Amino acid sequence: MPAARSIAALVLLLLAGSALAAEPDSSCYFYHGRDYGSEANIHPLQCILNSSFGIMQIANRSNVLADVDYANGYHVLMDNLAHPIRAIEAEGWGNFARKELLPFSTGLSDARYWPNYTQHLIGGGMTYRMMREWYRLHGYRHERAWAAGTIFFYHYCNEIVECAWLEGTTTDPIADLYIFDPLSCLLFESDRVSRFFGQTLNMMDWSYQPAYDLGRGTLENNGQNFAFRWAPSSWERWSFFYYFGAHGEGGLSYRRADGLNVSVGMGFKTNELLDLGPGTLGANLAFTGGVFLDREGSLMASLLVAATKDYAVRLNLYPGMVKVGPLSPSFFMAVDRDERVVAGLNIGWPRWQPMGLAASF
């Protein structure tokens, strides 16, 4: 019951904060209803798939859906949410503030605040506003409530999956669900904030295209990703570029005369999670780089290489890149953690499915 009250309080905070905000304008900052590229894939269910199971794309986490100990994850999560003070005291208030809240520590084992700010506060807030726009353009009433419910549900599922391999106390879901996730929705209720990220920084959702391998029971090619593109006023065709999720690649983007943008980035991604003690995870990093092709911010194709154990090479072709009669399928191909070639296809008919089918060779 204490855990249930905690969850109910969080939902009420999200909805109450949204209801108190000023009535927004009808501008679309992150979703425009385009039927091509990554924007054609945007849907609440695909958002939930990409976000809830994001940790499974890391090499030392199984991507077999049946391997996840959902019951353990649920009990660990709810126990820590119901007793947040106990969990924080076990780690120490100073450590909790330094590792989860204050963006000053530089060590990989201490900088747990980094995904809190990038993926939960900024990425989660952008996704909340994008979902509001999706629900509005698809004729749903009460767009705030629908968007807040979608965001909360995938954050909640994400924490269950992340806690599935843990035991005892952990402060990570406390920082996420009680602090950064509610703040993200309240932050992006602001039209000024949404306009800054959507129009000045040109923030885009460039998530992967999940597919299910029936033969192995694995979820392939899933993960939520974002991109920024910003240019000084004196630059006509070139822009600074940053692409991130469970990784981060920075580089440059060039706008061609035909309206397509070509971006190149290099950086690092999480290769493996490290067990640093009860309820505490760290990470080691590996080099990664990629080439991206988009039209009006909607990703058409991407080719990623990484010195990791999950996908060494990954190609994604989004709807609109290839057409077969009336169909516009999406496709991916990768070399996976077992050095197999894995490929996935979503035929795009009916117009949308939450995930495609994959097979490995």
Image (cartoon, rainbow, N blue to C red):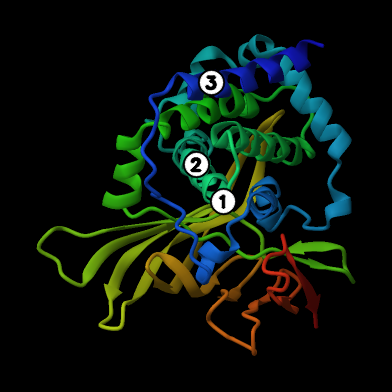
What residue sits right under mark 2 in the picture?
108
Q: The N terminus lies in which quarter of the figure?
A: top right
Amino acid type assigned to the residue bearing label 3 in the image: Phe
Circle on res. 96: 3
Q: Toward which corner of the image does residue 238 lie, by quadrant?
A: bottom left
Q: Is residue 75 above or below residue 93?
A: below
Amino acid type assigned to the residue bearing label 2 in the image: Leu
Q: Residue at x 69, y 36 (%)?
A: 153
Amino acid type assigned to the residue bearing label 1 in the image: Asn
How far from the left and from the top, in percent, is residue 242?
37, 58
First-in-chain label (2 vs 3)? 3
Q: Residue at x 67, y 57 (%)?
A: 57
User: Label 1 near label 3: C-beta < 8 Å?
Assistant: no
Count neighbours of disc 2 (C-alpha within 10 A) and say few if under 14, some if 14 to 19, many if 20 or more: some
Q: Is residue 13 left or right of residue 102?
A: right
Element under disc 1? strand
In depth, the one of 274 and 140 nearer the eye is: 140
The residue mark sitting in front, 2 or 3, is 3
How far from the left and from the top, in percent, is residue 225?
52, 56
In depth, the one of 345 and 292 nearer the eye is: 345
Element under disc 3? helix
Circle on res. 284: 1
How far from the left and from the top, in percent, is residue 167?
79, 29
Q: The C terminus lies in which quarter of the figure?
A: bottom right
